[in-house]
Image (cartoon, rainbow, N blue to C red):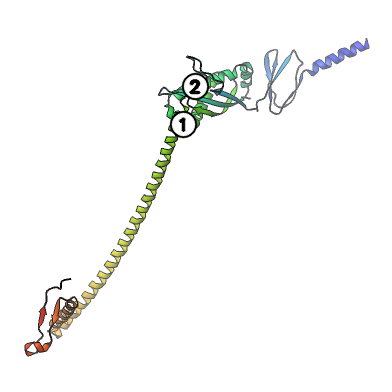
């Protein structure tokens, strides 16, 4: 009898122990009591009512999950059937796209219950929504635009819209990142598209080189223009300074001549003959005039003979 009582006590203790649950550091639990949510404990030891009364479901909320969406190497194009991940562009060309969607479970109150209720179909719904949005983006672009800009432009366009579309599905997941793992033309025309891409890349390189050369020449022209302006300004300043000095000297000399004219009426004639002598000497140096000796003239007068210019 005592053994039976001890056995019954052990069974009761084991049954009560079913109400103790350890929640891991990256987990969160949802506790339902007769189907109604009564608690959402975080990491640590949770003590509740035993099995049959409380039901504890643990969810790894801190673990990022990856989902591949779109074209894969296993995709086979059947007659009249487009394989998954193959989309039609705006100019009616086919493009193969494979995405990697990273998501986590939303640990906010209420969202955990949504995930537990729909976790069996979460990946399928997420895949279908991502494929639908990708088809929209590809259809809005030409094949060249899709292939050249898709790796950067598609994730930036897709991520916020994917979050918005999933909000109405109440899957209890958070999209963290979308990346393009593969983006290419179908195998039958891939070589041609790659050749076009290489030609376009070469064109871009040439355009960049021409742009750099144009910028260099523009800088050289600006430098030459600045140098010419500086030289012109310097020359102008020099000429103005020299002209001002000559004008001041002439004015001073004119004033001096006016004062001397009062006391020496023959001053202007002396100045004229002085300037004529300098002019004749200058002309002689260039071979334009010869001065004859005074004994050739009558009465000791100087005789000047002007000669035609010498032929070179």
Instruction: Give whichever of 101, 58 is nearer the camera.
Output: 101
Residue at (86% x, 15% y) in the render: 10
Query: Is 190 left or right of 253, judged from the image as shown?
Result: right
Q: Circle 1 is placed at which residue position?
A: 194
Residue at (71% x, 18% y) in the render: 56
- Whether residue 272 is visible to the viewer of this picture, yes or no, is no
State which tag comes first along the sequence, 1 or 2.
2
Relative to 120, is 295 above or below?
A: below
SS category of the residue bearing label 2: strand
SS category of the residue bearing label 1: helix
Rounded to the nearest angstrom, the CA distance separating label 1 from label 2 is 18 Å
Question: In which quarter of the view is residue 279 placed?
Answer: bottom left
What is the crowding at mark 1: few (fewer than 14 residues within 10 Å), some, or many (at least 20)?
some
Place of residue 18 in the rendered image (x, y in percent of width and height, measured from the top left): 78, 17
Place of residue 242 in the rendered image (x, y in percent of width and height, measured from the top left): 27, 70
Instruction: Give whichever of 292, 273 is nearer the camera.
Output: 292
Image quadrant holding the N terminus, namely top right
**Circle on res. 220:** none
Q: Circle 2 is placed at which residue position?
A: 86
Query: Looking at this rendering, what residue extends furthest in the top direction?
Result: 1
Place of residue 155 in the rendered image (x, y in percent of width and height, measured from the top left): 51, 29
Relative to 307, is 40 above or below?
A: above
Instruction: Give whichever of 100, 257 is nearer the camera.
Output: 100
Residue at (56% x, 27% y) in the render: 100
Relative to 196, is 269 above or below?
A: below
Instruction: Give whichever of 256, 272 is nearer the camera.
Output: 272
Query: Is 88 left or right of 233, judged from the image as shown?
Result: right
What is the crowding at mark 2: few (fewer than 14 residues within 10 Å), some, or many (at least 20)?
many
Query: Is 297 left or right of 224, judged from the image as shown?
Result: left
Mark in front: 1 vs 2: 1
């Amino acid at each position: 009898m005592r053994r039976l009582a001890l056995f019954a006590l052990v069974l009761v203790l084991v049954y009560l122990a079913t109400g103790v649950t350890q929640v891991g550091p990256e987990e969160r639990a949802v506790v339902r009591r007769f189907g109604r949510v009564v608690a959402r404990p975080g990491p640590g030891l949770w003590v509740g009512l035993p099995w049959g009364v409380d039901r504890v479901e643990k969810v790894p909320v801190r673990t990022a999950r990856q989902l591949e969406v779109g074209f894969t190497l296993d995709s086979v194009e059947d007659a009249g059937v487009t394989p998954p991940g193959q989309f039609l562009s705006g100019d009616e060309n086919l493009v193969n796209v494979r995405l990697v969607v990273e998501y986590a479970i939303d640990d906010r109150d209420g969202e955990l219950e949504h995930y537990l209720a729909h976790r069996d179909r979460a990946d399928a719904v997420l895949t279908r929504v991502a494929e639908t949005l990708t088809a929209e983006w590809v259809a809005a672009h030409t094949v060249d635009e899709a292939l050249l800009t898709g790796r950067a432009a598609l994730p930036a366009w897709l991520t916020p819209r994917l979050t918005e579309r999933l909000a109405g599905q109440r899957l209890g997941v958070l999209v963290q990142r979308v990346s393009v793992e593969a983006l290419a033309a179908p195998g039958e025309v891939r070589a041609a598209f790659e050749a076009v891409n290489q030609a376009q890349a070469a064109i871009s390189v040439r355009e960049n080189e021409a742009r750099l050369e144009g910028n260099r020449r523009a800088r050289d022209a600006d430098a030459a223009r600045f140098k010419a302006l500086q030289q012109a300004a310097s020359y102008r300043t020099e000429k103005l300074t020299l002209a001002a000095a000559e004008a001041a000297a002439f004015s001073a000399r004119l004033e001096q001549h006016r004062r001397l004219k009062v006391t020496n009426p023959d001053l202007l004639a002396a100045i004229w003959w002085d300037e004529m002598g300098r002019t004749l000497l200058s002309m002689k140096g260039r071979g334009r005039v010869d001065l004859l000796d005074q004994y050739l003239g009558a009465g000791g007068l100087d005789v000047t003979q002007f000669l035609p210019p010498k032929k070179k």
